Amino acid sequence: MLLGLASVTAAAQTVRTGLSPDISDTGTSLYPKPIPNNSILDFGVPALSRVGGTGLSSNTLNGAAPYGSPIEDTRIYFHGVLNQFEGRVGNGSYLRWDSEVWAGDDYNRIWLKSEGRYNSDNKGKVSDGDQEALYDRPISRYFDVQAGIRYDLDSGPGRTWAALGIEGLALDFWKVQATVYASDNGHYALRTNANYDLYVTQKLVLQPQIETNWYSKQDRGRGVGAGLSDIDMGLRLRYEFTRKFAPYVGVAYQRFFGGTEGLTHEQGGRVNDLRFVFGIRLWY
């Protein structure tokens, strides 16, 4: 139960701050120093002496908030995560990546996201590749709104999309994302993603994950049909030597539907694809 509570707390901090627990692997605090315990919460000390002893301005004591004015935090942080960098082994093995990096403070951030796969058995072509640049701002304690652009960049024809979505922690602390896209040629798309970190021990983590993609119209050039295009799900078990370096093994399953299934058949692809995966998860 304590491990579960610890993982829940860590997950909540990860979404709000983008960082796992507020202490780094070297034991160094990743955030500005906390308010001294004997400052505004020490009601046994006269107010004027608290001001002089803590360095807080008089506004701290005269503000409307019960525990003083909020502490201004304009420090700029940087954080990057390579969530998936894995080989998917099976009939026609390939390398897949899924990463994101952000920079900003607690309220305003710029996100860059990238995913795709390198097909070593298909003359080195890159497929399923898209890159996103998003502005992020919190709208509640657990959710952020994100808006920006996505560009499909791989060996196929490029597509430009406007993007609008939310990302945060849902029921039972699942990390969820839902983003709507509108392309420059009148197409619309929806992507959803959900994953959960189940701490088996303090270093061994089991992560279920599922992603879906939906399109309003067929795009033969990109090999997608209208409606539900595909579901990509996985179950990965990683071992965190440190929180910044964690190799993993698992299984991944991808299934195409509707018009995308037909186009996949035409191109000689597999509509049901179950693979063994191995890779590493890194963050900075």
Image (cartoon, rainbow, N blue to C red):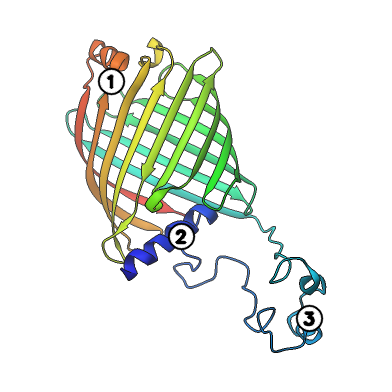
Image disc number at residue 20: 2
Q: Which mark sits nearer the N-terminus, 2 or 1?
A: 2
Name the residue rendered at 32%, 43% in the picture: 209
Q: Amino acid at mark 2?
A: Ser
Q: Amino acid at mark 1?
A: Phe
The residue closer to the viewer here, 56 or 133, is 56
Image disc number at residue 51: 3
Q: Position of residue 105 (x, y in %)?
A: 64, 53
Crowding near pointer 2: few (<14 within 10 Å), some, many (20+)? many
The residue closer to the viewer here, 20 or 6, is 6
| Residue 238 position (above or below residue 186) | below
Name the residue rendered at 64%, 50% in the picture: 107
Residue 33 location, quadrant: bottom right
Residue 72 location, quadrant: bottom right
Q: Position of residue 159 (x, y in %)?
A: 50, 19
Q: Position of residue 180 (x, y in %)?
A: 50, 28
Quadrant in the picture for the N terminus: bottom left
Distance from Cα at disc 2 to Cα at disc 3: 33 Å
Q: Amino acid at mark 3?
A: Val
